[in-house]
Image: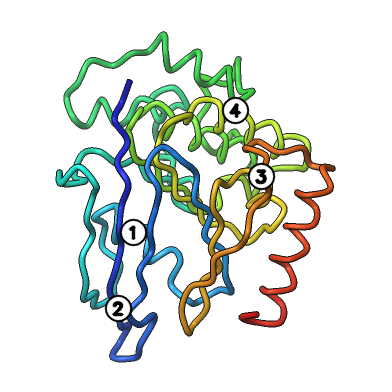
Amino acid sequence: MIAAPSITFSGAAEFSGAPLFDNITLEIKGGEWTCLLGPSGVGKTTVLRIIAGLDSAVNFRGKIISSDGKTLQNRTAYMAQNDLLFPWLTLLDNVCIGATLRGDHVEKTRAIEMISRVGLAGHEGKKPSQLSGGQRQRGALARTLMEDRPVILLDEPFSALDAKTRADMQELAAELLTDRTVLLVTHDPAEAARLSHQAIVMHSTGLQHIDMPATPPVRGIDDPQTLATQGKMLKILREGPQ
């Protein structure tokens, strides 16, 4: 079993000299799903990119600490808002790109199985231009799941999907990422209420933790506690900190 650490993200960030977020402390629990919601522009994606070790175009002053004391380098998989599939590669080659770039053994049989799991069997040889937006997003999800990392960073990974496919992919991701440390950025309170062990709303003034149902994820979409939590999140997103 992959050991999935807890992560403490703390600090402040500026963009072009203007504060983006100031002195926040985000505790991401090991082996669980943490959902981060909030209005656009407060820095949710920036937090993901900083944890992933990617260029975020901000001045970040702070620290990222894992519970096992080890660096997060090479232990994270990041899925961006855009699918970022290479247009000159087939879907299969895109799903295998991580291993290819690292010079690792390419597990094509496993990649084909993953493509099938996301509902794209028969599309392995297609280029991204031959796929719909939702299909490309599922391809990007398959690529992320192929990485099999202990820390998974997801930036609106289901946003381009229709309602049925979104629910199916949520359940698949929850199944395959059991015991991983997952940080999911979403604008969808229903998604956060259904998937998260803990949900946090990020405001310009800080973070607000949401009381979650006692039932474990993945919760039923029509479960009364899930719906109540969804409504609570939406009210906070519309009206600000409570």
Residue 181 falls left or right of residue 218: left
Q: Check disc 2 and report its element: helix, strand or loop.
A: strand
User: Dot 2, crowdedness within 10 Å: few (<14), some or many (≥20)?
Assistant: some
Q: How far apart are marks 4 and 2 (CA)?
A: 34 Å
> In the rendered image, which residue does mark 1 sit on?
49
Can you say which quadrant of the picture contains the N terminus?
top left
Q: Residue 186 shows which numbered tag?
A: none
Work out whether mark 4 precedes mark 1 in sequence or the reverse, and give the earlier one: 1
Q: At label 4, which amino acid type do we have?
A: Leu
Residue 88 position, x and y percent, is 40, 35
**Closer to the camera in the image, 41 or 207:** 207
Q: Distance between the residues labelled 1 and 3?
A: 31 Å
> In the rendered image, which residue does mark 2 sit on?
12
> In the rendered image, which residue does mark 3 sit on?
214
Q: In which quarter of the image is residue 9?
A: bottom left
In the displayed structure, 199 sits above or below 94; it is below
Q: At label 3, which amino acid type do we have?
A: Ala
Work out whether mark 1 precedes mark 3 in sequence or the reverse, and give the earlier one: 1
Work out whether mark 1 precedes mark 2 in sequence or the reverse, and give the earlier one: 2
Q: Check disc 1 and report its element: helix, strand or loop.
A: helix
Work out whether mark 4 precedes mark 3 in sequence or the reverse, and give the earlier one: 4
